Amino acid sequence: MFVYSTKIRVRYAETDQMGYMYHGNYAQFYEVGRVEMLRSLGSSYRAIEESGIIMPVVELRCKFIRPARYDEEIEVRVILAKLPGLRMHFTYELYNESGVLINIGETSLAFVNTKINRPCHAPEDFLNKFKAYFEHS
């Protein structure tokens, strides 16, 4: 299992009239978590795309427990429970500044070869960045 954590502050523009983060913005926090997780391993969406593979989101789930509020620093925890194959499944846990779990989410991304517009397996060099975290599972 691989777990990565980053923090994001809720900006005013991301909130509604009540000062709560607008529900559609949670998916953006998930994306920031994924991007930073890949960056922490020395990879990026850009590098994957340059190799001829794109990773569209094919499934999104989101459970709201408590609201994220304006100006709070939110911890976004990204969990990868198994090595990617044709898809890569992420679980997210969002915590407020008090360490209280406020949101749980999941996304599945597919690997798609851009030349033939068909699903493909994750690139080997990409998988190698994760294998050490799963060897003793």
Image (cartoon, rainbow, N blue to C red):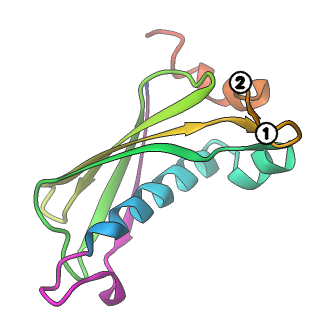
- Pointer 1 residue: 117
Residue in the foreground of this view, choosing between 60 and 133? 60
Read off the magenta span: 2-21
**Would you identify the image quadrant in which residue 99 lies?**
bottom left
Residue 38, how many percent across, how many down? 60, 46
85 to 24, vertically: above or below = above
- Pointer 2 residue: 121
Residue 2, how many percent across, how many down? 46, 31
The residue tagged with tag 2: helix, strand or loop? loop
The residue tagged with tag 1: helix, strand or loop? loop
Residue 12, how many percent across, how many down? 30, 89
**Would you identify the image quadrant in which residue 61 lies?**
top left
Give the class, few, some or many, for how many residues have Cα within 10 Å of label 2's Cα (few <14, many ≥20). some
Q: CA distance from mark 1 to mark 2?
A: 13 Å
What kind of residue is marked 2?
His
Q: Residue at x 70, y 45 (%)?
A: 43
Q: Do callouts 1 and 2 mark residues in contact (Cβ within 8 Å)? A: no
Examine the structure image and report whether residue 26 is included in the region drawn in magenta: no
